[in-house]
Image: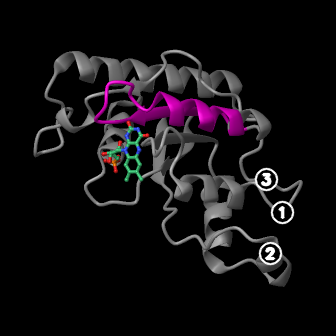
Amino acid sequence: KSYKVAVVVGSLRKASVNRKAAEAVARLAPDNLAFEFVEIGDLPLYDEDVEAAGAPAPWTRFREQISAADAVLFVTPEYNRSVPGALKNAIDVGSRPYGQSAFAKKPTAVMSVSPGGIGGFGANHHLRQSLVFLDMPVLQQPEAYIGGGWELFDDAGEFKSDDTRKFFKSFADAFASWIERTAA
Ligand code: FNR
């Protein structure tokens, strides 16, 4: 069976290592997963008054893209030991209106990439806290706290280390199995 995976990258910058890492997971994953990158940079800040007046087009577009997917992959940097505000906003937008969360029950996985040695652990686990409430089954192993992020890829976007490539492959394979086991 094939599955659609929405990819949400927590960084907005063009040269993001998290985006490169997400692209690598998509490249290495089994063929029965089709990945769609869902952009978050244009989402107005979540505001219940704005919702009541009528959802802005980018909110509706984001909600529809997440709803159309069977699973969601989050790849995020750590900002001040948590997730970037843009990513938290996207989660808030997708989770509403109340009772109509686009995320509910979709299998998910979290990877965090940082130039530092802790590999975005703080962001990774803050994000997991929200995913529990969103009722998303989260892949537990392998954990993916990727340190030394600025050294991962060469200028062509290829892995510099074969061990790292193998780790990414094992993560992608585990996520594919997880989706097969837990998708609705
Ligand atoms: C950072 N960075 C950072 N890194 C980290 O490991 N822990 C942290 O708490 C923070 N905090 C932080 C806050 C803000 C506001 C910025 C802009 C950056 C550094 C961050 O990991 C680095 O810029 C990454 O390269 C960002 O990921 P992308 O954009 O390359 O995907």
Look at the image and give the residue range highlighted in magenta: 106-130
> Residue 3: horizontal and vertical position, in percent?
57, 39
Corner quadrant of residue 24? top left
Which residue is most to the left?
A: 155
Residue depicted at x 70% and y 26%: 182
Residue depicted at x 55% and y 20%: 177
Q: Earlier in the sequence, mark 3 or mark 2?
A: 2
Residue type at tag 2:
Glu
Corner quadrant of residue 108? top right
Residue type at tag 1:
Pro
Q: Residues within 10 Å of mark 3 (few under 14, many from 20)?
A: some
Q: Is mark 1 within 8 Å of ligand 1?
A: no
Residue underneath mark 3: 101
Q: Are marks 1 and 2 in contact (CB under 8 Å)?
A: yes
Residue underneath mark 2: 51
Residue type at tag 3:
Ser
Q: Is residue 44 left or right of residue 167?
A: right
Per the model, the C-alpha gap separating discs 3 and 1 is 7 Å
Q: Is mark 2 within 8 Å of ligand 1?
A: no
Indicate whether 47 appears above or below 36. below
Residue underneath mark 1: 97
Residue depicted at x 25% and y 23%: 165
Q: Residues within 10 Å of mark 2 (few under 14, many from 20)?
A: some
